[in-house]
Amino acid sequence: MKYYLIAGEASGDLHGANLMKALKQEDLEAEFRFYGGDKMSKEGGTLIKHYGEMAFMGFTEVLMNLSTILRNMKACKADVLTYQPDALILIDFPGFNLKIAEFAKQKGIKVCYYISPKVWAWNQKRVLKIKRDVDKLFCILPFEVDFFKRWGMDVDYVGNPLLDEIAQFHPNRAFKKLYGLDDKPIVALLPGSRKQEIDRLLPPMLEMVPLFKDYTFVIAAAPTFGESYYNNFIGEGRVKLVFDQTYDLLGEAHSAIVASGTATLETALFHVPQVVVYKGGKITIAIARLLIKIRFISLVNLIMDRKVVAELIQEECNQHTIAQHLKSISTGPNRETMLDDYKSLSAIMGKPGASLRTAKLIVTFLKAHPFT
């Protein structure tokens, strides 16, 4: 069968690649066409546009790049229609993907949504559009199932694909030697994969370096940016760069400062105590505070439904506050409490296999409802 996948961010590329791998196990004739990235490209098929050209963060950034987004959307719709897939598989990225879902549904194309949109965070009435336009919805967070049920939707909880990726991870035993890392404890800096968030978050992260002389700071750098880009921030500082080896870094890290997003959950699943940070444009934050109705921004706290990790947002994301929280989880009872909470989190998340479970459900659904 023919599958058209759309992932608009680094995490979507990762999960899309694992899903493609699983689909090839379930469907020996699987063909792929996709919006995604390097990891999906390695699984075969045809890459139409790289996510690096599509990811815009925040309300104001979206408005400033609206013409580009609309061009991408128009091109994507035309390409989907020409390809006529057996299924359109949308991976997170709701601002873009929900529009494509509406279009595909109108054209009679089956729509599967993997990693359901976080409509529980704000504007919950968007659920009605999902209910109308999406044929199969796959959730990866335990609390989402009850949320969608309250709106009359029958959804599938497939587990979290991060567990798949972590289960497949084989640490590089020469990692520290390769990057010239000494025996000092490592603080991993994960400033995100999009330029806007790196520009805002990496400077206050790097302000920590002089305050923690007994630690080594290492940046998990996004592969879409070059070394020179990061060196503009680092200067002559004693900070190392690691490209595309985030799991090796987390495997060796003593603690971490992490941009709010999927990386907070990855860090927790590696049992690395962390401080979560977030900064947006002033207008974006003002709008978000009016619209967003959730208690937490990090996946760790959302899943646990209580404060496990500190969340330093906007004004609190500064040298003094980050240093205070980083110090509190370096040693002592706060660190031990967080590690115990991580054990509970791992138990809630369950076992690996989300990608294969999703692939099986998609293929079974398509065989029962073939494209006509």
Image: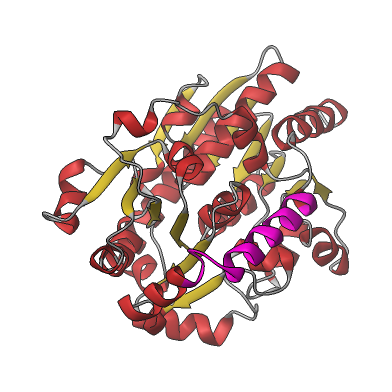
Instruction: Please say whether residue 119 is visible from this viewpoint.
Output: no
- Residue extending furthest left? 236
From the top left corner, tell me how far across and down residue 39 is, in percent. Answer: 47, 30
Q: Quadrant of residue 59?
A: bottom left
From the top left corner, tell me how far across and down residue 97 is, in percent. Answer: 56, 52
Which quadrant, please, contains the C terminus?
Answer: top right
Asked if residue 93 is among those painted magenta in the image, a careful observer would answer no
| Residue at image point 70% right, 12% down | 28
Of residues 43 and 315, the one drawn nearer to the viewer in this rendering: 315
| Residue at image point 60% right, 36% down | 166
From the top left corner, tell me how far across and down residue 352 is, in percent. Answer: 73, 36
Q: How many marks?
A: 0
Magenta region, residue range:
328-348
From the top left corner, tell me how far across and down residue 53 is, in percent. Answer: 34, 46
Query: Which SS type dominates the magenta stretch?
Result: helix
**Viewed as shown, does residue 28 lie left or right of 275?**
right
Of residues 25 and 370, the one drawn nearer to the viewer in this rendering: 25
Asked if residue 344 is among those painted magenta in the image, a careful observer would answer yes
Which quadrant, please, contains the N terminus?
Answer: top right
Question: In the picture shown, does residue 28 fall above or below 300?
Answer: above
| Residue at image point 70% right, 59% down | 340
Q: Quadrant of residue 66?
A: bottom left
